[in-house]
């Protein structure tokens, strides 16, 4: 086998080590980069006039088939995704925003939610529900912010309050949304 060499204009000798192209596209073409992804879902439900606090809609986040939902009396983290959706659609329309996250980001979200459940439910009197800064929507916004997802536009929130509609509007513009799911009220 003969060795092929190349001499550059400045006299440097190069030896050919492969005859196969290792890059299937030209330098100017976009190249596919594969990464491992996972997802979480944020569910925004419409208002319910007969429930304290829910007259302003409601937001929950689903991670690993568990619904984390901040309510007046603490965090509810005992319902599965199916149980949560079944209850919500019995009396309100909802939209789910499935967000693309990395496995590491999902772990951070889950850890932050477990921390919030522990401190809120461990001592509810010192972590009271507040529409201004400790609501269902502010908690979801804060949790997503842990991994750098801005779930609402702070320029438009009144007095720093984050509403479920702010979350819906913010996520509808997010490049992290890989699917939007509609859960219509079943009318029962």
Image: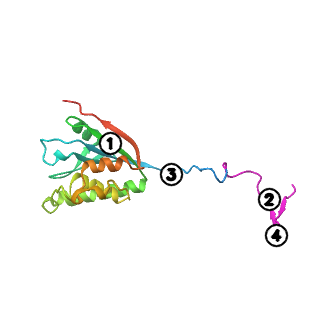
Marks 1 and 4, how far apart in space? Answer: 62 Å
- The image quarter in which residue 144 lies: bottom left
Of circles 3 and 4, the one toward us is 4
In the rendered view of the protein, which quadrant contains the C terminus? top left
Separation of residues labelled 3 and 4 (CA atoms): 42 Å
Q: Is residue 69 magenta?
A: no
Vertical position of residue 77 compared to residue 181: above or below: below
Q: Which residue is mark 1?
A: 96
Please state if 155 lies on the left or on the right of 38 as rendered.
left
Residue 102, given in percent of the width and then of the height, sits at 43, 53
Q: Does label 3 or label 4 sit earlier along the sequence? A: 4
Circle 2 packing at 10 Å, graded few (<14), some (14-19), many (20+), is: few
**Residue at (21%, 34%) from the top-left corner?**
90
Q: Which residues are magenta?
A: 1-25
User: Which image quadrant: the N terminus?
Assistant: bottom right
Q: Main secondary structure of the magenta part?
A: loop
- Mark 1 or 3, nearer chain start: 3
Tag shown at residue 35:
3
Q: Callout 2: helix, strand or loop? A: loop
Dot 1 or dot 4, earlier in sequence? 4
View extreme (right): residue: 2
Residue located beneath label 2 in the image: 16
**If you read the primary sequence from the N terminus, does the residue marked by circle 2 or circle 3 appear first?**
2
Q: In terms of sequence position, does the residue under pointer 4 or pointer 2 come before the other?
A: 4
Tell me if residue 10 is in the magenta stretch: yes
162 or 74: nearer the viewer: 162
Q: Position of residue 57 (x, y in %)?
A: 21, 45
Q: Camera-side residue: 30 or 142?
A: 30
Say which element carries label 4. loop
Question: Is mark 4 in CB contact (under 8 Å) with mark 2?
Answer: no
């Amino acid at each position: 086998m003969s060795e092929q060499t190349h001499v550059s204009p400045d006299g440097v000798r190069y030896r050919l080590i492969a005859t196969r192209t290792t890059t299937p596209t030209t330098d100017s073409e976009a190249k596919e980069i594969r990464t491992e992804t996972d997802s979480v879902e944020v569910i925004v439900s419409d208002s319910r006039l007969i429930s304290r606090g829910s007259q302003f809609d409601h937001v929950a986040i689903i991670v690993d088939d568990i619904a984390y939902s901040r309510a007046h009396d603490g965090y509810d983290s005992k319902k599965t995704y199916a149980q949560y959706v079944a209850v919500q659609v019995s009396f309100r329309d909802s939209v789910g925003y499935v967000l693309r996250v990395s496995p590491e980001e999902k772990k951070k979200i889950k850890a932050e939610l477990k921390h919030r459940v522990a401190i809120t439910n461990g001592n509810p009197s010192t972590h009271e529900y507040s529409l201004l800064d400790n609501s269902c929507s502010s908690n979801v916004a804060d949790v997503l912010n842990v991994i750098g997802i801005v779930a609402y536009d702070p320029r438009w929130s009144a007095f720093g309050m984050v509403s479920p509609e702010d979350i819906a509007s913010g996520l509808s513009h997010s490049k992290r949304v890989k699917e939007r799911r509609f859960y219509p009220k079943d009318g029962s």
